């Protein structure tokens, strides 16, 4: 009896155009959800990474030298400033401030000492 009552409340058959429209609505809704999730993930990455900095304000590791036993010497560059860092598993130490990268590159090409500005 219950099965007959449920069968009488559900339409017996949908036309092909109704089914197509129903599937288009379902896929459209899923597509809208996916697009929203994609754009929210991009927005959250930009917020976390602080995308309001210009490219010259980013810190780059320009050179790395392994000293063994998970210890490294690294040259970190931010804009025109270069710093020598000692890195171990437990600490990071600032060892020295290096000259500007452009003056060091020019001196290496000339084969002489760094130019004094």
Image (cartoon, rainbow, N blue to C red):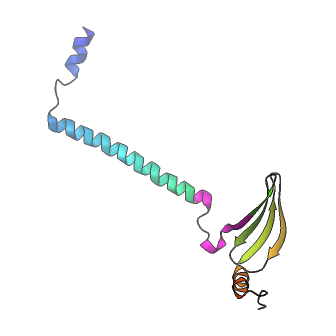
Instruction: Please tell me how many numbered marks the rendered image carries.
Output: 0
Viewer-side residue, 110 vs 14: 110
Q: Does residue 51 appear in the picture of this structure?
A: yes
**Viewer-closest of 54 and 36:** 54
Horizontal side, residue 113 vs residue 45: left or right? right
Question: Quick one: 50 or 9, which is closer to the camera?
Answer: 50
Query: Range of the magenta residues?
Result: 47-64
Query: What residue is rendered at 41% in x and 51% in y?
Result: 35
Q: Quadrant of the N terminus?
A: top left
Q: Picture quarter containing residue 16?
A: top left
What residue is shown at x 68% (from left), y 75% (from top)?
A: 79
Which residue is at 25% across, 17% downward?
Answer: 6
Relative to 63, 86 lies left or right: right
Locate residue 101: give its quadrant.
Answer: bottom right
Residue 84 among magenta residues: no
Q: Is residue 86 left or right of residue 43?
A: right
User: What residue is at 36 percent from the left and 46 percent from the top?
Assistant: 31
Relative to 86, is 54 above or below?
Answer: below
Q: Position of residue 14 (x, y in %)?
A: 17, 30
* Residue 63, quarter of picture: bottom right
Reply above or below: 115 against 68: below
Residue 46 in percent (x, y) is at 56, 60
Q: Nearer the viewer, residue 89 or 31?
A: 89
| 55 is within the stretch colored magenta | yes
Left/right of residue 66 with respect to residue 53 in the rendered view: right
Question: Can you say which quadrant of the picture contains the C terminus?
Answer: bottom right
Report if residue 54 is visible in the image.
Answer: no
């Amino acid at each position: 009896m219950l099965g007959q009552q449920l069968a009488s409340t559900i339409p017996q058959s949908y036309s092909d155009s109704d089914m197509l429209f129903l599937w288009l609505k379902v896929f459209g809704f899923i597509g809208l959800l996916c697009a929203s999730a994609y754009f929210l993930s991009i927005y959250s990455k930009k917020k976390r990474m602080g995308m309001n900095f210009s490219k010259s304000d980013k810190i780059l590791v320009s050179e790395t030298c392994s000293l063994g036993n998970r210890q490294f010497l690294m040259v970190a560059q931010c804009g025109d400033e270069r710093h020598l860092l000692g890195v171990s598993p437990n600490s990071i130490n600032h060892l020295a401030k290096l000259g500007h990268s452009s003056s060091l590159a020019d001196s290496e090409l000339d084969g002489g000492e760094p130019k004094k500005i």
